Amino acid sequence: MISRRRFGTFLRAGALAFAGSLSFAHAAAADTIKLGIVGPFSGPFALQGKNFQAGVEAWLTQNGKSVGGHEIEIVYRDLPTANPQQARALAQELIVKDKVQYLGGVYFTPDAMAITPLLKQGNVPLVIFNAATSAIMTSSPLVVRTSFTTAQTTTPLGKAAADRGITKFVSAVTDYGPGVDAEGAFKKAVEAAGGQVVETIRMPLNTTEFSPIMQRIRDAGAQGVFAFLPSGPPTLGFVKAFSDTGLKPAGVKLFATGDLTQESDLPALGEAAAGMITGFHYAISHDSEVNRAFVAAGEKAIGGPGQLTFPAVGAYDGMYVIAKMIAATGGKQDAEKAVEAVKGLAWESPRGPVKIDPETRHITQTIYLREVAKDAKGNWINKEIQSFPGQKDPGLAK
Amino acid sequence: MTLPSPPFLWPSMQTALSIALDALAYGMALFIICIGLSLTMGLMRVVNLAHGAFAMIGGYIASYAARDLALGYAFAITLAVLGTVLIAIPLERLLFRRIYDRSELSQVLMTIGITFCVIGITNYVFGPTLKTIPLPAELARPVDLGFRSIAGHRLFVIASGLVVAGGLWFLIERTGFGIRLRAAVENAPMARALGVRTELIYAASFALAIGLAAFGGVAGAEFLPIEPYYALRYMVTFLVVVSVGGAGSIGGALAACLLLGSIDITARYLMPEFGNFFFYLAVILVVCLFPRGLMGRAKA
């Protein structure tokens, strides 16, 4: 496997000699604070890992590589696919051997679940840049999350879909944790608004040929379809099949989470996705000064336009949170104090106004309803058409 | 209020026809990609795990030609096939030639190594995003068959599959090249003694297999989208098809693709929640009943 275990590590030799020795080093004034980031930097999800890195680099370019006189050193660790055992081993190595004060990243839920039991003993907070299952937050009080949950993006979508006067839905989701979450959240939201989900289809994770699924949707007589698939090659097959088998020309409306229309896939989806409605927390085309600056820095870090997508904003905001933690603890290793300091933290993110919910430590944010459309230059974008501000994670609401 | 979803949906006649058509298209796409692998494994006795990588290279070339250079679809396919063969020729000379007589383990190790290199290089050159091959208007348009509409491209894939199967059968069973190829496979030293240039024959059939892989990569791109990990992602499916069909047999590969394609598609329609259960169940049954595959040759 072409594993690139270490990406750019910003070594400052002088400061390191002091900080790396023993735990006494925490008292030092001019020190280096290490931050370990775990993500899929190679393998089939390398694009998502690249986006983690782009988000982190964008933040460092804009804000400099030190916080309150403490140098930040990033240690990247590659975890190509969901692999809890390896995730645990990597986190352990980062905490014990590399002596990181903060952990960040994590693309898949099982990996996050494997890392959280280590946090208390290691005295290290974990800031999750992506892993989107609600339950992670309850597994340790030292976890903060700057991404989204499937329930969070799906609930407003379900309401908006039912508000369009469609009453008969079929849900088609990928058969794994987040898919089941998405199905539940959509169904609940649609039923609350008076609609009906007449059939729920769970598709195997490695499905590549979707015409039988489309046939099933047609036979169920749906007016609207809700779809959730993780980003990647199958989303293209799904959207194309929806259009090719005649469901789209027949006027059936397709609703999905933003995973299906991440910006890097839009040029490939093209015309087949036009008019598709998605619910998500971030679009690269979001109209704000903060976002334009972020996108410019992010595209530079990732090596050109067209590859930047949502995990980058999770990483960028994650860096903001970690910087606040470093400032609040004065560079000392104190995980509890660090997490306490960011509870209720509110700021302007590239995605819009966000806040760390003090109860759940998950990010409260605006969820946007978007339509796949062309911008003035003729590029396909996720055009924001409606916003639902201040959305918490319904999956964590008691 | 929700109706409980029916655990089992009995299809109407119209639905059954529609599923059969989808299965045919999917099976044919698999066939075009896999037949080359079946030939290398059955006739040349090389376990080429880089077969998917060559299909992917074909896809990338076609995508580059049709999308970035705006050339026609037919031209893009030709370019993809020729380009991939051109890339494969030095590889055959430098690497593959050394493993023809080696153990299967050496073959697997070397070809998987080539696959990883190809993945790394494409990721570096073309980036990790999905690449599409724009279809000409005639193939992109849905065709109305009365009981349903089907993408014109799928009809093209079905037709291509039939042409490939017929053409290969003719080439191997009815031409002078076919006779020499079969002779070289049966007994290479004897064939050489009779003046058959086995090295040339091997090189030509290797090129043929790679060319078919590239064509399959392009024609099947609507089913299996082109991205760097393509080379490994679908390799298991390709190998399963070859072992079920019996390596080296055109009829076997065709039967395996149609059988597995229709089981896969039908099961996904009737019981999607069972995932690949029925697909692999069928594979296990076939392999138990026909250890050499449906129409495999006895080992020489």
Image (cartoon, rainbow, N blue to C red):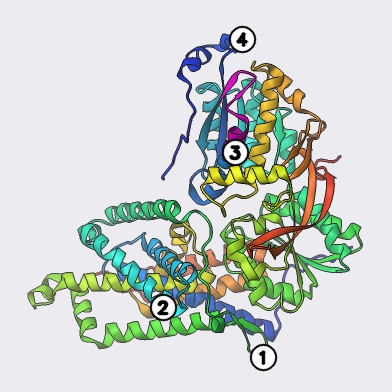
Instruction: Determine crowd level at label 1: few under 14, some 14-19, many 20+ residues with C-alpha closer than 10 A.
Output: few
Distance CA(mark 1)–CA(mark 2) = 32 Å
Q: Amino acid at mark 2?
A: Phe
Q: Chain of mark 4?
A: A
Distance CA(mark 1)–CA(mark 4) = 78 Å
Q: Nearer the viewer, mark 2 or mark 4?
A: 2
Distance CA(mark 3)–CA(mark 1) = 55 Å
Q: Which residue is mark 4?
A: A27
Position in image of residue A5 (x %, y %): 45, 36
Q: Which residue is mark 3?
A: A58
The magenta region covers A57-72
Q: Nearer the viewer, mark 3 or mark 1?
A: 3
In the image, what residue occupies the spot 24% across and 57% down? B95
Q: Secondary structure at mark 3?
A: helix
Q: Which badge, 1 or 2, comes first in the chain's sequence?
A: 2
Q: Quadrant of residue B296?
A: bottom left
Numbered tag placed on residue B146 in the rendering: 1
Instruction: Determine crowd level at label 2: few under 14, some 14-19, many 20+ residues with C-alpha closer than 10 A.
Output: few
Distance CA(mark 3)–CA(mark 2) = 42 Å
Q: Nearer the viewer, mark 4 or mark 3?
A: 3
Asked if marks 3 and 2 fall on the same chain, the answer is no
Q: Choose between B62 and B53: the one closer to the eye.
A: B62
Distance CA(mark 2)–CA(mark 4) = 68 Å
Instruction: Determine crowd level at label 4: few under 14, some 14-19, many 20+ residues with C-alpha closer than 10 A.
Output: few
Q: Amino acid at mark 1?
A: Gly
Q: Nearer the viewer, mark 1 or mark 4?
A: 4
